[in-house]
Image (spheres, rainbow, N blue to C red):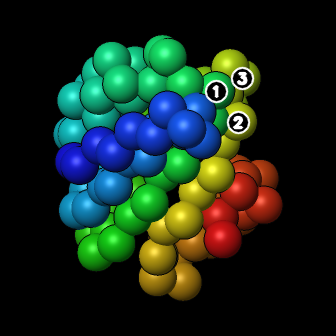
């Protein structure tokens, strides 16, 4: 995962790819916690997502409680339906 920080915009950007599932969520969560604490806004950008599950959805909900959150993740139809059903489609550009 690549992390970009912009103090000017008070935003941190996470570039994710591959699996956003239970098998990787502990590492993703740790990166988010370690790199977002000094910023008001979080942008999660994603490409080449192979897999997404409820653990990522839960992570998004927990982040949105304390941060302004934007998602810009390219998903296939099945993956997008997971976000839609979970009620977080409004975050994804």
Residue at mark 1: 40
Residue at mark 3: 65
Real-space CA distance between mark 3 and mark 2, rounded to the nearest whole angstrom: 8 Å
Compared across the picture, whether 65 is left or right of 63 comes to right
Q: Which residue is drawn at 72% across and 23% down?
A: 65
Return the residue nearer the eye: 56 or 36.
36
Q: Which residue is drawn at 66% across and 71% down?
A: 93
Spot occupied by residue 67 in the image (x, y as percentages of width and height): 66, 28
Residue at mark 2: 68
Compared across the picture, whether 54 is left or right of 20 comes to right
Q: In which quarter of the image is residue 41?
A: top right
Q: Is mark 3 on a helix, strand or loop?
A: helix
Spot occupied by residue 43 in the image (x, y as percentages of width and height): 53, 49
Structural crowding at the residue carrying mark 3, measured as other residues with C-alpha within 10 Å and reported as few (<14), some (14–19) or many (≥20): few
Q: Could you tell me if the residues under marks 1 and 2 are in contact, i.e. CB atoms within 8 Å?
A: yes
Q: Could you tell me if the residues under marks 1 and 3 are in contact, i.e. CB atoms within 8 Å?
A: no
Q: What element carries label 2?
A: strand
């Amino acid at each position: 995962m690549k992390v970009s920080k912009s103090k000017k915009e008070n935003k941190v950007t996470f570039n994710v790819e591959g699996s956003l599932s239970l098998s990787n969520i502990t590492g993703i969560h740790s990166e988010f916690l370690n790199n977002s604490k000094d910023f008001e806004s979080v942008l999660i950008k994603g490409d080449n997502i192979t897999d997404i599950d409820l653990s990522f959805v839960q992570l998004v909900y927990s982040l949105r409680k304390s941060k302004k959150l934007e998602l810009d993740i390219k998903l296939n139809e099945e993956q997008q339906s997971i976000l839609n059903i979970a009620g977080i489609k409004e975050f994804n550009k």
